[in-house]
Image (spheres, grey):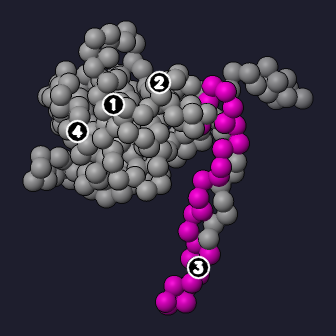
Amino acid sequence: MRILVSNDDGYFAPGIAALAEALSAVGDVTVVAPERDRSGASNSLTLDRPLSLRRSANGFYFVNGTPTDCVHLAVTGMLDHLPDMVVSGVNHGANMGDDTIYSGTVAAATEGYLLGVPSIAVSLVSKAATDFSAAARVARDLAERFTRAPFQQPVLLNVNVPDLPYDDLKGTRITRLGKRHKAEPVIRSVTPRNDTVYWIGAAGQAADAGDGTDFNAVSDGFVSVTPLQIDLTHNGLIPAVGEWIRK
Ligand code: MN
């Protein structure tokens, strides 16, 4: 089992170290991750300059690019073999509901999935996480499941883990994405040079955290596993828009 590991918090992040260590019990792990925190990078590719691939003292590779760059570069140019899995994380913070649109953690896994590799994004639901071991162990459990029971088609799983000790997790629920309220407004600030600048505000609170959602599972103490798809087509609107464009 060959496992490619990436993230969006950067190759130095404690979450990726915990993940790589946990997954090394299941297979050969190669880490290729951004050289700095690229949280919120979504699925962006760097097209306006070349990328460098460097190796740190602990064996992790790092790239001066986005999470998507890392997985793309690794799978299409660096690795001798297609990996059997891509695992991204463990992210410092939740990626639930609309977060998945902006997330670089989910994007790294999405890139694996688009390249035909079963892929998992793992996030720890915590604002001040210090212990990533339980979430890393959840990732290891899922990777072991893949070796025991391989999926016949590429699959993209978004996994969120409550910030609890492993033995206190209630179990695992299969979920759909919930929905957040719109984000907090930008925060205006003035620099020492008297320029006005703006910080993007925090994500909104959960708006749809009802039964079956990722928000709901995590707040009940369960690991949330959401299968994702990338086709953005709104099939339900095809008839109505079809009529509208003839008006
Ligand atoms: Mn992140």
Q: Residue furthest bottom?
A: 193
Task: Assess whether mark 4 and mark 2 are in contact (beta carbons under 8 angstroms).
Answer: no
The x, y position of residue 79, in whole percent, is 17, 32
Which comes before the other along the chain, label 4 or label 1?
Answer: 4
Q: CA distance from mark 2 to mark 4?
A: 22 Å
Q: Is residue 161 visible?
A: yes
Q: Residues within 10 Å of mark 3 (few under 14, many from 20)?
A: few
Residue 172 marker: 2
The x, y position of residue 71, in whole percent, is 30, 38
Where residue 242 sits, quadrant-wise, is top right
3 vs 2, front mark: 2
Residue at x-position 23% and y-position 31%:
23
- Amino acid marked by disc 4: Ala
Q: CA distance from mark 2 to mark 1?
A: 12 Å
**Does the segment drawn in magenta span residue 213?**
yes
Q: CA distance from mark 3 to mark 1?
A: 40 Å
Q: Which residues are magenta?
A: 188-215
Which comes before the other along the chain, label 3 or label 1?
Answer: 1
**Quadrant in the picture for the N terminus:** top left
Q: CA distance from mark 3 to mark 2?
A: 42 Å
The residue beneath circle 4 is 20
